[in-house]
Image (cartoon, rainbow, N blue to C red):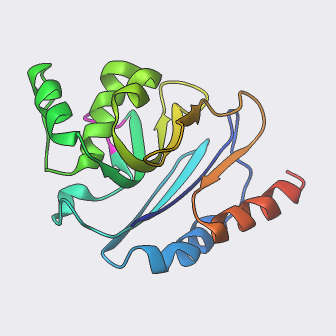
Amino acid sequence: MCGIAGRFHPDLLPPAPEWCARADALLAHRGPDGRGAYQDSQCELVHRRLALIDLSPTGHQPMPNEDATAYVIFNGEIYNHRALRAELEGHGHIFRGTSDTEVLVHLYEDLGERMVERLRGIFAFAVYDRSRTPIGRRARRRTGASRRSGPAPKAGAAACGHRRRTRKWRRSLRQRSW
């Protein structure tokens, strides 16, 4: 499975020049097939890829929507991605590849935060919507477990990551004075 990490602040992301490289290094064992990062003044996203469904470069993450106003980082598998893809294509969305990740970014465009209700599978993801503040959605689901999701905090810094090493590092970030 892939590795994901991110940090966000609704006003201005505090400087942390080492953050992206450190997060990437901590997640390196999770994704030998690729790496990606996105950064702007409010958000940094890091992704390490283990390609399972779409082995082509069109599955590269962080994955933007068509106009690059929303980005998604994702780990897991969406079991119903083919049915969702067909539905989204019927709504006029154009897909560049066959990745289940791409379904997430288009589903977010259509349903916003309600997108989680339509997903079946095991996953962890974050959506950063540049046109909205704060971060669009963070979600995690394991089959057989209750769904936990919600918007990021409206004030203060937020960090996300699903691996134990990343969570440990997030705690150290929280202890720093921004």
Res 7 visible: yes
The chief SS type of the magenta part is loop
Q: Residue at x 30, y 29 (%)?
A: 107
User: Does residue 84 appear to the left or right of 107 in the view shown?
Assistant: left
User: Does residue 62 appear to the left or right of 145 in the view shown?
Assistant: left
Q: Residue at x 15, y 34 (%)?
A: 83
For residue 17: magenta? no
The spot of residue 28 in percent (x, y) is 48, 78
Q: Residue at x 49, y 38 (%)?
A: 128
The spot of residue 73 in percent (x, y) is 42, 51
The spot of residue 104 in percent (x, y) is 32, 38
Using the rendered view, name the quadrant where residue 18 is placed.
Answer: bottom right
The quadrant the N terminus occupies is: bottom left
The spot of residue 74 in percent (x, y) is 41, 52
Nearer to me, 93 or 44: 93
Using the rendered view, name the quadrant where residue 25 is placed.
Answer: bottom right
Nearer to me, 172 or 21: 172
Magenta part of the chain: 64-68
Q: How many marks?
A: 0
* Farthest front residue in view: 144
User: Does residue 155 appear to the left or right of 132 in the view shown?
Assistant: right
